[in-house]
Image (cartoon, grey):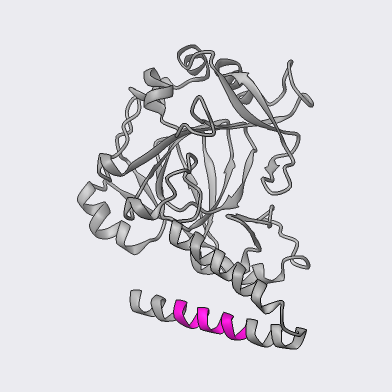
Amino acid sequence: MKKHVALTIRSGITKEDFFSEICPKREPVILRGLDIGPCTNTWTVPYLSQTGGSDEVKVHVSTVCEMDFINKNFIYRSLPFNEFVQRASQEEHTHFFIDATEKYYLRALGEDPRKDVANISVHFPKLAQEISIPDFFEPSQFFSSVFRIASKGTQIWTHYDVMDNLLIQVTGRKKVVLFPPTDVDFLYMSGDKSRILNVDKPDLEKFPKFVHAKRVEGYLEPGDILFIPALWFHNMTYLDFGVAVNVFWRHMEAKLYDSKDPYGNKDPLPAQRANQIVDRALKALEELPKEYQDFYARRLCDRIRSKACKADEENR
């Protein structure tokens, strides 16, 4: 593996600083010392349980810390929000689905997960009043605000998002590992997720290219905000029972995003069309003998990479 790079930490950032110094660089940054409201003090387990209510939420439940979305080493279950918070805050459970040390993870959704975009102001209005989200984007660009709550030790799979976002760490500590978009060739992707589950102890016989990935690492304390630019891969480990709010916004023109995507993780429409064209190209090449398929597939890859490298040089 390449040498780890420490996440940059900036304090006292204003909206003007964010747009002139941070956002244009397209690199993740920990923003420290911003006022996120009284939530860092008030959002205790008893308070969350009482104020968050008893509406059911769908949660991931796993017997292992490293949750794997590709191979689904967890089950989905529903719990009243107050009971979920109680269970997630415990390392050993009296009531459980699989075993007494199972781990829980919540990515809060709307009432209808197939249609409703997550918004804590709508689904958790009392709690939403106690967190201040930095006004780093225009209200019209807002897409979603998502509760992220998990048991101590839970590690969330490496993936990328198509929108810029702020991860506001309210309670608990979290280790974050990120990789730049240019490392996509080293991360063995399946959709928007990496097949490398353990980024700390990877199987290099199975994933040899991973040694070339540039790892950026840092630690979030309560009150910290992590800016994650779109397409940056990230992996999160909850060092404590943790509560965070993830805020996504559309930083490109709205017409480029898939309007039928309540999760906000589908590739932009032009990228979807490009993938469809590649599928048709591959289907066309199947009409040729194997040696011709290989030859022209390599030529297509070279054309695409040449175009991508040219665009990268122009953006530098």
From the image, give the main secondary structure of the stretch colored magenta: helix
Range of residues picked out in magenta: 298-308
Q: What percent of the width, then of the height, locates residue 28?
A: 42, 56
Q: Quadrant of residue 19?
A: bottom left
Q: What percent of the width, then of the height, locates residue 104?
A: 65, 30
Q: Who is closer to the viewer here, 176 or 52?
A: 52
On the rendered structure, is 244 left or right of 16?
right
Q: What percent of the width, then of the height, locates residue 24?
A: 30, 62
Look at 72% across and 42% down and name the residue there. Answer: 72
Residue 214 in view, yes or no: no
On the rendered structure, is 268 left or right of 63?
left
Magenta stretch encompasses residue 304: yes
Look at 55% across and 84% down and name the residue there. Answer: 302
Residue 106 in view, yes or no: yes
Q: Who is closer to the viewer here, 285 or 96?
A: 285
Quarter in which the N terminus is drawn:
bottom right
On the rendered structure, is 198 left or right of 109?
right
Vertical side of 43 occupied by 228: above or below: below
**Across the whole image, how many numbered discs are drawn on residues?**
0
Quarter in which the C terminus is drawn:
bottom left
Q: What percent of the width, then of the height, locates residue 200?
A: 66, 55
Q: Who is closer to the viewer here, 33 or 140?
A: 140
Magenta stretch encompasses residue 60: no
Vertical side of 55 occupied by 193: above or below: below
Q: Who is closer to the viewer here, 5 or 166?
A: 166
Q: Quadrant of residue 103?
A: top right
Look at 64% across and 81% down and name the residue there. Answer: 297
